[in-house]
Amino acid sequence: MKFSALSTATVLVSLLGQLPVADASCFHGARRVPQNMADTLATLLLTAGNAEAQGTYPKSGAYWLSSTIDNFEGGRTCLNFGIENISGHLKEISTAVAVEGLLREWVTCGNGGKTDYRDGSLNGWRFIFHMDDKGCKK
């Protein structure tokens, strides 16, 4: 059986949508997560891989990636994924941890969101996902 990026994204979203996320701060407004799951997932995975490649994060280090994708509604949507070290000390992140945190923001909050983790596998990280045009070049 062959899987496309869209079917893979759909499976991941459905599985992660069942996970509880404590203390998630969802954003409000008119901007909704785009229907283009394949490009959203590709941007998320690129962010996670680049975040690991950054190496050691300083006490307040962060990595952001902004990308414009087709929103399947005749326009484009600016996606912004962010990962911040909130542990108070030097820290490295793996791609797997970054994917887990960013996926939770994507599937838990329909308008994007931000979550600080103080325990568990995501301890010491803040994950952010929003659709603000400020991060994308026009």
Image: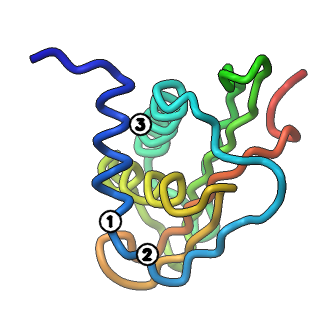
Foreground label between 1 and 3: 1
Describe the element under mark 1 as helix, strand or loop.
loop
Residue 67 in the image: above or below residue 117:
above
Q: CA distance from mark 2 to mark 3?
A: 22 Å
Relative image position of residue 64 (x, y in whole percent): 65, 45
Q: Residue at x 56, y 75 (%)?
A: 24
Identify which amino acid the numbered label 3 is placed on: Gly
Residue 62 in the image: above or below residue 95:
below
Relative image position of residue 130 (x, y in whole percent): 70, 51
Q: Residue at x 9, y 17 (%)?
A: 1
Task: Residue under label 3, please give it.
Answer: 49
Q: Residue at x 34, y 57 (%)?
A: 16
Task: Residue under label 2, please give it.
Answer: 21
Task: Residue under label 1, please give it.
Answer: 18
Query: Closer to the N terminus: mark 2 or mark 3?
Result: 2
In this view, the residue in front, 42 or 75, is 75
Q: Which mark is residue 116?
A: none
